[in-house]
Amino acid sequence: MPYTLTLDQKRGYLHARVTGTNSAETVRAYTQEIHDACVKDRCRAVLIEENLAGPSLSLAAVFGIVAERSVQAAQLHQRIAFVDTNPEHDLSRMEFAENVAVNRGANMRLCPSVEAAERWLLADSATAPGTNPG
C-alpha cells in the first residue's frame, strides 16, 4: 500500500496529490486521509489529482470504495473533482465511480485535467454556502 499524499490548501478548495501503487488498499487509505483533513479544516471542496501506478481497479473494487466514501462525502456536502493522470487507466472505471458517487448523494465530477477541475470547483464554490475561502 505504498503511496505519497500531498495536501495543499488553495483558495476555495483542498488540492490532494497522490502517487504510489494502485490498489484498493491505497485508495481507501488516501481517501480516508483526505476526509480526515477536510473534517479538521472544515473543507467543503477537494481536487484529487491521482497518479497511481499499476492496472485499473476492478469494477467491484471501484464500486465498494466509492459506495463507502460517498457516505462521508455527502455528509460533508463536499464537491470532489477527480483527475486521474495515469493514461494507462481505464477512463470508463472512473466514469462508473462518478455515477456511483452521484447516485449516493456525493457531488463528484471526473475532470480531464487539473485546470478543468479547478474551474469546476471555483465556479461551483461561488454559489455554494459554507465554502472555506482558503
Image: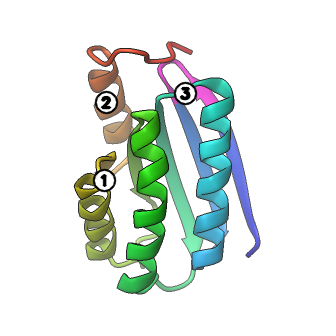
Dominant secondary structure of the magenta stretch? strand
Judge from the rendering whether residue 104 lies leftward or rightward of residue 46; answer left or right. Answer: left
Q: Is residue 2 magenta?
A: no
Residue at which label 3 appears: 43
Name the mark nearer the viewer: 1 or 3: 3
- Which region of the structure is painted magenta? 8-13
Q: Quadrant of residue 99?
A: bottom left
Q: Amino acid at mark 1?
A: Pro
- The percent position of residue 101, horizontal first and vertical second, equals 32, 57
What is the CA distance from the residue labelled 1 to the residue labelled 2? 11 Å
**Labelled disc at residue 66:** none
The quadrant of the image that shows the C terminus is top right
Judge from the rendering whether residue 90 lies leftward or rightward of residue 61; answer left or right. Answer: left
Q: Amino acid at mark 3?
A: Cys
Residue at which label 2 appears: 119
Tell which of 54 and 72 is nearer to you. 72
- The percent position of residue 117, horizontal first and vertical second, equals 35, 40
Q: Quadrant of residue 75?
A: top left
Residue at which label 1 appears: 112
Judge from the rendering whether residue 91 lies leftward or rightward of residue 44; answer left or right. Answer: left
Crowd around label 1: few <14 · some 14–19 · many ≥20 (10 Å): some
> Can residue 114 be seen by looking at this rendering?
no
Crowd around label 3: few <14 · some 14–19 · many ≥20 (10 Å): many
Under circle 1, the secondary element is loop
Counting every numbered tag in the picture gives 3
